[in-house]
Amino acid sequence: QVQLVESGGGLAQPGGSLRLSCAASRSIVSLRMGWYRQAPGKERELVARITSDSSTLYADSVKGRFTISRDNAKNTVYLQMNNLKPEDTAVYYCNAIIIAVHYWGQGTQVTVSS
């Protein structure tokens, strides 16, 4: 098992930046980690994920704007979000997969508005 705690959400203007953090309660060195988001009235969708060897995958909608990274020494995963757009507004969730079981954080709200 693992507990995940997100932080770093908030209000940003279009074109602005935010950095989300996800702190895990145990070592993440062997885990595939990811960020998902869910906007009102929409299904939860994958934003980015990073494997244990730091291979990354991004949703087409965020490629070139968002960067996922990991610091195994701190048991933390980050999502750097640049050039934010109003359509990025959503609750962002951290995700970890352990033996095919998905674990989720409580989510952090990101609102992009002028």
Image: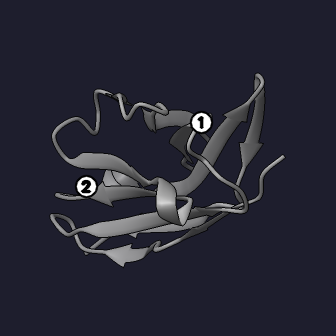
Q: Vertically, is 42 above or below 87? A: above
- Residue 86: image tag: none
Q: Vertically, is 91 above or below 41? A: below
Question: Is 57 displayed left or right of 91 in the figure?
Answer: left
Q: Pick the residue in front: 52 or 7.
A: 52
Q: Vertically, is 39 above or below 59? A: below
Quarter placement of the C terminus: bottom left
Pinpoint residue 13: horizontal percent, then vertical percent: 24, 73
The residue under the point 84% across, 46% down is: 1
Pinpoint residue 92: horizontal percent, then vertical percent: 54, 55
Secondary structure at numbered mark 1: loop
How far separated are the C-alphas under marks 2 and 1? 33 Å
Q: Name the residue under label 2.
A: 85
Q: Earlier in the sequence, mark 2 or mark 1?
A: 1
The residue under the point 75% across, 34% down is: 102
Q: Pick the residue in front: 6 or 91.
A: 6
- Residue 30: image tag: 1
**Mark 1: few/some/many CA within 10 Å (<14, 14-19, 20+):** few
Question: Is 96 displayed left or right of 76 in the figure?
Answer: right
Under mark 1, the amino acid is Ser
Pinpoint residue 59: horizontal percent, then vertical percent: 35, 29
